[in-house]
Image (tube, helix red, strand yellow):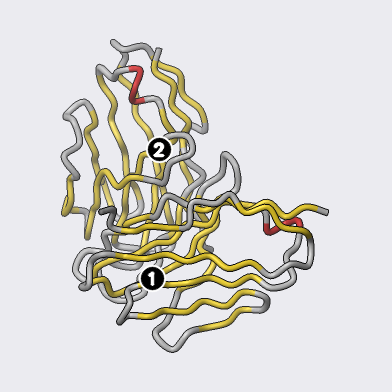
Amino acid sequence: DTEVTQTPKHLVMGMTNKKSLKCEQHMGHRAMYWYKQKAKKPPELMFVYSYEKLSINESVPSRFSPECPNSSLLNLHLHALQPEDSALYLCASSHVAGGPYNEQFFGPGTRLTVL
Amino acid sequence: RKEVEQDPGPFNVPEGATVAFNCTYSNSASQSFFWYRQDCRKEPKLLMSVYSSGNEDGRFTAQLNRASQYISLLIRDSKLSDSATYLCVVTTYNNNDMRFGAGTRLTVKP
């Protein structure tokens, strides 16, 4: 089952709200990722988790806080976001982080709108 | 210079046409190469990995030229369902840090 699920599909939040995005995979993958994608742009890497530990943080503002409770779950906690943070947030997973031909599988994304 | 550069497109072709996309990468330490396709308002989906010897999957052929640091994707006998944005993706060995090209939009018309 090559499926990554994400909830919610859509989220509208105000700048003072706190919300969380959730991602789940049951492929036994040990690497999980968060990407941000703006319209007509490619995905941009935000965070990489390898064996439940944060291995890459691409200088993402602290208003985005990732969490990996276990090997199947990845959360992204949002607080005090700005309107320019509105985007499609994609979760992905791969067998491990690193190594050759380690394909990443993407979830359907959460479309976030910050008012 | 961007790490991964693609033909800007858009490509508008009739059904049955052959179309080719190129992609260049700047990091000579890059180890893995992929083509993903992304439909409008959907997530990227893996189309093909690109191996050093080149590989083919039905109507799709991918080539890698390490010396010149470019990869290509050839689509033969285009179908309407091939209409999508094609993303060139390059990773380094150590951390699976995927770098995406800006994408090339393909529209196949009847």
Three-letter code, disc 2:
Tyr
Could you say which is closer to the camera, residue A46 or residue B35? B35
Residue at point 62% right, 54% down?
B11
Query: Image height check: is A52 above or below B40?
Result: below
Disc 2 to disc 1, C-alpha distance? 23 Å
Residue at point 29% right, 62% down?
A30
Give residue B6's quadrant in the image.
bottom left
Query: Image height check: is A99 above or below A79?
Result: below
Q: Which mark is residue A16?
A: none
Query: Image height check: is A47 above or below A12?
Result: below
Number of numbered tags placed on the structure image: 2
Circle 1 residue:
B33
**Callouts 2 and 1 in the same chain:** no
Name the residue furthest bottom. Answer: B53
Could you say which is closer to the camera, residue B84 or residue A93? B84
Disc 1: which chain?
Answer: B
Check the picture and name the quadrant holding the N terminus of chain B.
bottom left
Mark 2 vs mark 1: give the one in front: 1
Circle 2 residue:
A89
**Callout 2–callout 1 Cβ contact below 8 Å:** no
Q: Residues within 10 Å of mark 2 (few under 14, many from 20)?
A: many
Secondary structure found at label 2: strand
